[in-house]
Amino acid sequence: MPRSVFARTGTPRASWHRPYVGWLVLLDFLAALAAGSTAITLFEKADAGFRNDPVLAGQVSTFLLVANVGVPLGWVLLLWACGAYQRRALGIGTEELTRVFRATLAMAATVSFLAFAFKKDLSRMTVVVVIVAMVLYTLLGRFVARLVLHRFRRKGRRASQRVLLVGTISDAMAVYTVASRNPAAGLRPVAIHLPSYPRAGEAVSAPIPVYVGWELVPLVREIGADTIAVCGPASLESYELRKLAWQLEGTGLDLVVVPQVTDVTGPRIHVRPVEGLPLLNVEEPTISGLSLLTKILLDRIAALVGLVLLSPFLIGIAIAIRLTDRGPAIFRQTRIGYQGKAFRVWKFRTMYVDAEQRLEALRDQNESDGLLFKIKDDPRVTGIGRWLRALSIDELPQLVNVLMGQMSLVGPRPLPTEDDAYQGDVRRRLLVRPGITGLWQISGRSDISWEEAVRLDLYYVDNWSLAYDLGILWRTVSVVLASRGAY
């Protein structure tokens, strides 16, 4: 059996990442070059007379060589060493962002070590400018690359892994539903293989072909798949899974095992081998400590800065509301927040002043479920209110709630209901502060069901992190601009 990646028995089918990684390497190299150019421009402005000084001119020549050759090559190598080009970290999630920041720390440490080892008196400001600019340019390039990748996946179904689901029909369909929910994730189920024949009279229905009685490796080649996903513990016996892993060696095919643990992100899952038995260790959610304190401080600072910068715009919106419809510009309503405490949420008024009195007459037209009340063409919404809702501008006054510590920038949305309506799993939403935006908003807003909204909120509560918050804020911009699911 060949063990070298250069001596495979077949051409790897899941090869979309190779040209994609090539483009990322080029973009990262150019980002480092641009960062060096930025520092050089600032350096020239600060030391305009260096050309007449031979000593300074020699220092500048050395700096140009390092900035244009050493830094770009070193940056690409550090990104590679930190796993920023590994396929499992590319295209979706915050793992790619985490690895880029890890490479940033490695770059800062490397520069400090080299300066100390060679006794070079580097300008600290120049180093800071280079590293900060390099990170910003790199993230911008990778954001553009990810947008292009997602567009390919949504439109042409290219750049995706073709997955054969192995397991019972219920387990396979559960994975199919999750994988098909977001085509940008890059997993495209193409067939299901049942581990045993259905019982007499048992109906088997699926939107993709269902196979039974095949050898898995020949079946994968027959249907043109590149990944085998074993769904659920009853799909294969342990010795069968081990044998399958052996069969896939050297074929370029991927093997994925879907555990029973769902809605848990990677940082909370660790594999701990004990005497050859891999134990899946699931850590409890971290909703306290230094990370939470940092989140609270960042929320307060961002809210204060946002209110100051946006104050002319907010005042203009308030005046427009008053001119188009008599009544207060700000609407305040009691919501349930952190640990079940009630508070008054601030919003720009988007409905007529008698909206509450007209609510009962519209109850039977409710298009939502659970604790939500939504009507796509709600007659209580004013003309300017529809525009404010489409762009979520009506939520901006909630920066006041964030500044007061009642809300966060990111978290589950506060709902207009009594505390006793939060029963069972729904009460878990109250373990964190409600947010202006959240996973629910970037996943469909008003277009998703109450059950799915609760699932997304609980997923956030169990897996939140500062990097995850930054990712949600980033995705909120595109969702708001597209006005998806806003009414």
Image (cartoon, rainbow, N blue to C red):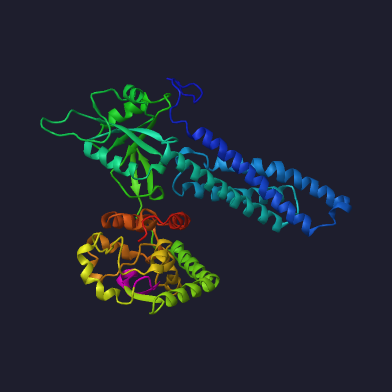
Q: Quadrant of the N terminus?
A: top left
Which residue occupies the extreme left position in the image? 201
- Asked which quadrant contains residue 221, the reply is top left
Q: Is residue 8 left or right of residue 243?
A: right
Bounds of the magenta segment:
335-351
Q: In this view, does 42 lie to the left or right of 138?
A: right
Q: Say if 3 sits above or below 368 in the image.
A: above
Tell which of 401 and 54 is nearer to you.
401
Magenta span includes 343 = yes
Question: x%, y% of residue 199?
Answer: 13, 31
Residue 122 seen in render? no
Q: Quadrant of the C terminus?
A: bottom left
Q: Is residue 221 left or right of residue 91?
A: left
Question: x%, y% of residue 451?
Answer: 26, 55
Question: x%, y% of residue 76?
Answer: 61, 41
* Residue beneath the point at 56% across and 49% down: 139
Question: x%, y% of residue 105?
Answer: 58, 51
Magenta span includes 375 = no
* Residue beneath the point at 36% across and 36% down: 188
Q: Say if 473 sits above or below 402 in the image.
A: above
Q: Say if 339 sits above or below 327 in the image.
A: above
Tell which of 346 and 374 is nearer to you.
374
The total number of labels drawn is 0
Residue 184 seen in render? yes
Which residue occupies the extreme bottom position in the image? 327
